[in-house]
Image (cartoon, rainbow, N blue to C red):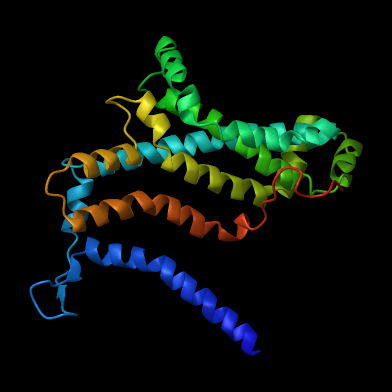
Amino acid sequence: MIAWRLAGAWRWALLGLFLLPLVWALLASVDIVPDGFRRFGAWQLDPTLAHYQEVLGESVGLAPATLTGLAVAAAATTLSVASGFAAAAGLRRLATSWSRRLGPALLLLYLLPVIAYGPPLADGARWLGLYDTLAGLVLVEAALTLPLAIWLLGGYLARLPRELDEAAALDGCSELAALWRVLLPAAWSGVAATAVVVFVLDWNLFEVPSLLSLTTVKTVPLVLSAFLTYERDLEWQPAAAALLVGLAPALLAVVAAHRALRTLAPLGGADEV
């Protein structure tokens, strides 16, 4: 009993250490900061949302960048997870030794540094007329996270019983119908968890948007980089507000789907049923 309580106390302590910078940034973003001109421990208690208005307004431009980033991340996530689910289901049907060993190869493909393929990627986007466009950025981000989506969804589908496929075949379902009516409902929590992971990665991408966009398409990481790099006399309060605006969508997505995230298993991480 004592050990269980100590373990719980350690979890809360670690959670507090993790949340402390976020709480500090939240207080600073509404102008609740230590008062350096008074005695130690004194605070300025004059909360305001002016710093959020500043970073979301035209001077910084986080509001349009947030809408653009949400649209790009949502579209790329949908395309990547849908394609990854179909590919993972196909590999599951093959059930060969090489298909089960494909996970490490896919993960290695995902882990390739952007600098290895960035310049030819930008040249190809210009040649196809997709440079500095939403469609080009969505397609590239979806392709970038596709190997990871296949790896994650393959591990989850490997845990489903083979009887599902047999029952679908006995009912006369085609492969596409079985994929839509049988496998997708059975693997829905894994699909949702994969979508959250892919969305967070797409939302935080910096190198790819910086290579494929110039003036038209600006995501939150690009705007934050320009704001924090080139802004003169940068104050901590607006920087904290910008940080929280950039963090909010990914944090909300993770909090909303924290239960689904527990269901993930990598490709080959579960025994074939």
Q: Is residue 142 above or below residue 53?
A: above
Instruction: Tell which residue pokes out farthest to the top in this image.
Output: 127
Who is closer to the viewer here, 204 or 86?
A: 204
Q: Left or right: where does residue 263 sit relative to residue 99?
A: left
Q: Is residue 70 above or below residue 4?
A: above
x then y, percent, for residue 74: 47, 39
x then y, percent, for residue 259: 60, 61
Question: How many tags in the picture?
Answer: 0
Who is closer to the viewer here, 62 or 10?
A: 10
Q: Residue at x 34, y 25 (%)?
A: 213
Q: Left or right: where does residue 241 sit relative to residue 129?
A: left
Q: Residue at x 77, y 33 (%)?
A: 91
Tell me if I can see residue 177 in this picture.
no
Instruction: Tell which residue pokes out farthest to the left in this image.
Output: 37
x then y, percent, for residue 81: 60, 37
Res 50 → quadrant? bottom left
The quarter of the rendered structure image containing the N terminus is bottom right
Q: Residue at x 73, y 45 (%)?
A: 155
Res 214 → quadrant? top left
Tell me if I can see residue 220 in this picture.
yes
x then y, percent, for residue 250: 44, 51
Q: Residue at x 59, y 79 (%)?
A: 7
Q: Is residue 245 above or below residue 217?
A: below
